[in-house]
Structure formats: C-alpha cells, structure tokens
Image (tube, rainbow, N blue to C red):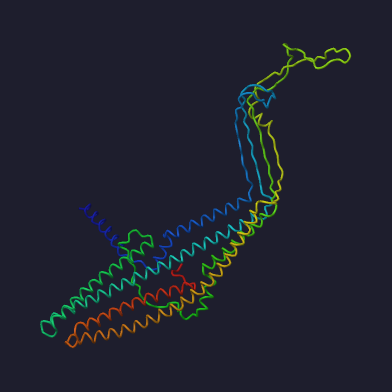
Amino acid sequence: MEKRSFFSLITMLICCVTIQAQSKKWTLEECVKYAIQNNISIKQSELDSKTALIDKKGAVGNFLPSLNASASHSWNIGLNQDITTGLLQNQTTQFTSAGANVGIDIYKGLQNQNTLRKANLSIVAAKYQLLKMQEDIALNVANAFLQVLFNKENLKVQKQQLGINEKQYARSEELVKAGSIPRGDLLDVKATVALNNQNVIAADNALLISKLSLAQLLQLKDFENFDVVDDTDVKDENNILAQTPNAIYDKALEGRTELKIARTNLEIAQKNVAIAKGAFQPTLQGFYSFSSRVGYSDRVVGFQPNTSNPTSVVGYVEGTNQNVLQNNFSPVLGKALPFFDQFSDNKGHSFGAQLSIPIFNGFSVRNNLERSKVSLERSKIALEQQDLDLQRNVFTAFADAKGALNAYESSVVALEARQGAYDYAKEKYAVGLMNSFDFNQSQTLLTNAQSEVLRTKYDYIFKIKILEFYFGIPLIKN
C-alpha cells in the first residue's frame, strides 16, 4: 500500500512538472536573452572574437625570439673521406649531428608594433560585431514576438466574430420561422458563418506559423508547446516621441554600434598603411647558432713504423744524387670516443647580426602600400556612409513612429464608429428593416476595422522600439 502511494506521488509530481513546462509563457525579455545565448549567428560571431584573440597572440609572438633545433643521422657508403681520420677509403661511416638556432628581430620598421596595435583593434572590432549581431537578433526577436501577439489577438477577434455570427444564425432561424425575414437571408447568414470558420482556421494557422518562426529564431526544439505572454499594452514608456529627431540622432552618434565598427575599421586600415610603409625600411636581426657532431668510425690514436715499407725517398743530394730517405709510419686506429665526449669536443658557436636593406622587390612592397591606401580610402567612405545612413534611418524611424501613432489613433476612432454602425444595423436587422446583405456588409466593415486596429497597434509598438533602439534604450534590462 505504501509502495503504491509512493508511485502515485511520483506520478503526480511528474504530471505537475509537465503541465508547468507546457504552461510556461515567455516574455519578450526572456526571448531576447535566450536568443542571444543560443542563436547560431551569435555563436559564429563569438568564434570571430576568439579568432581575433588568437591573432593577437601571433602579433605578440613577433616580439619573441625564434628558437629552432635540428638533428640528423647519416650513413656514407662507398669511397669517402672519414672526417675524423681524414683517410679516403671505401667504407661505411655514420655520423650524428645536432644544432640549434636563435633569431630575434631588433628593428623591423615598426611593423611588429603596428601589427600588435592592429590586432588589438581587431579584437575591439570583433566585440562590436558581436554586439551588432546581438542587437539585430534582439530586434528580429521583438518583431517576431509582436507578430505572435498580433496573431493571437486576431484569432480572438475572429473567434468572437464567429460566436456573434453563430448567435445571429440562431436568431435568424427564429425570425424566419416567425416570418419576419425571408429564408434567403438565413442562407446568407449561414454563408457568413462558414466564411468566419475559414477565417478562424486561417488565423489559427498564422498564429502557429508565427510561434514556429519565433521558436526557430530562439533555436528552441520543443516549439509545439511554445507560447508567449499576452502583454499587449500600447504605450510609449520612455516618451521617446517627445524627443526631436536631431536629439535622437546626436544620441545615436555617441553609441550606435555600426558607427563604432566603421571607426574601428578605419583605424585598422590606418595601421595597415603603417605596416606597409615599414616594409620600405631596413631590418636588423640578431642570430646565434650552436652545432656539434659525433662520428662512429675508428679514430687515429697514434703512429707506428711501417715494417713492410720502412722508408721512402723524399729527395736527392745535389751533386752526388744520393737518395734522401725518411721513415714511414702507419696510423694506429682505435675505437671512437664516447658519444658525449665527441659532442663536447666537436661543438661550435656562431653569432652576429644581419642587416637587410630593401632596394627592389618587383614593386611588391610599393603595391602593398598602394593597396593599403586604397583600403584606407574605402574605410573613410564607409564611415561617411554609415553616418549618412544613420541620420536617414533616425529621421525615417521618427517619421514612421509618428505616422504609426496617428494611424493607430485613427483606426481606434474608426473602430468606435464602425461598432456604433454595426450595433445600429443589428437593431434594424432584428426588426426586419435591413436585409442580410447590408447587414453582412456592416459586419465585414466592423471586422476590417478591428483588424486594422490590431495591425496599426503592433506596427506602432515596433516602430517605437526601433526609435528607442536608436536613442540607446535597450530592449531588455541587463
């Protein structure tokens, strides 16, 4: 009995957790934060930042000495000279050699310094690119979020209209039975109900697709249970429309990420020009090398008289032509010295400095400089274009927000009028003073007015978000 109660408790807990997970509704802030943490494009931009850090390590490494070691072992087969004994003979010899080289740039036309400065600027540019990507994703999420809200409200409107028409159909059946309206009007109302059913299905599909789009933007896999909160207030919390377009533009000049990217790219282009100019200057490098070798052949340990040929003629006495003889000696060979003894005895060192002066390199250095200057001019133009684009975008966004507000206010007034006209038409239709065609027309105009209010409302909300975005007000709080 206790075991059964335990399993029942576990089952209830699992069901509660499942229901809670399915009933979770995402806020705009939660959607933006989740997208920034999980969006694929942002992850790719983060990898670009890591690449910039690696490039900086390479720029720092240019200041450090280079150290390389080498080792080899060789076999010489056939007639060759033993470098240990100096004898030329047909034999197989083995040698081991090892060495190390150290080099360091003493002066390189400030290229290393400018390369490091450029790497630091590239890190800053990569961070700005990441921030720009996050801002773009945040705006896309906000737009998709508002589209879901619009479709949710539109679905409510279509369902409400369907409910009204179904009641109207039931009322029309009574009026037909009473003889107040002709049976043809009932068929018109029935057709209207069928059309409303289609509108509900279309609105439901639009809502599902908008949820799917937002879930995919967030990289959510379980999008079937995905839903957002019904926060549909229309308000300008920060009173952004009280600002002037020039004030918003001046604020945008201080903090807009695309301008920071353009300025940083201009500084990078300037460093590229400095690096290219440095290639015209002489370079001075210091070097040090160490080498040693070890042989495995027999070595000469002494000499002994040659018994088979004890003497040899080396000349003649002038006048008597008497031979001048000398004693012949043969080398006495012994085993090679131990490995480390030879390594120590045969070691050698060399060090110095090397000066290189560029005189002519097939115009490669000059062409690199010219390319860098062209890139610098492109960066200057790009910065000017970003400034012009920002000014145009700010003034356009301000005008769009103003127009969206006016359109929303006008649609609200129009809806109130259409609602009044519909209520009046409903009363006339109920007493038989209006035919079904005119009544359906009034109902269609009301539905269109309701849809227009929804469209202008969410258009206004998004336009305000864009204007706040240029003014430096983030979509979410840190």
When the figure is inspected, residue 28 is found, relative to residue 319, above or below; the finding is: below
Residue 423, by quadrant, is bottom left
Left or right: 310 in relation to 272: right
Residue 218, by quadrant, is bottom left
Residue furthest top as drawn:
308
- Identify the residue shown where x is 50% and y is 74%: 392
Residue 88, by quadrant, is top right
Q: Nearer the viewer, residue 344 or 361?
A: 361
Left or right: 156 in relation to 137: left
The image shows residue 383 at horizontal and vertical percentages of 56, 68
The image shows residue 22 at horizontal and vertical percentages of 30, 62
- Identify the residue shown where x is 81% and y is 14%: 325
- Identify the residue shown where x is 34% and y is 81%: 411
The image shows residue 225 at horizontal and vertical percentages of 30, 62
When the figure is inspected, residue 115 is found, relative to residue 249, above or below; the finding is: above
When the figure is inspected, residue 212 is found, relative to residue 280, above or below; the finding is: below
The image shows residue 460 at horizontal and vertical percentages of 40, 76
- Tell me how many marks there are: 0
Q: Nearer the viewer, residue 374 or 91?
A: 374
Residue furthest front as drawn:
362
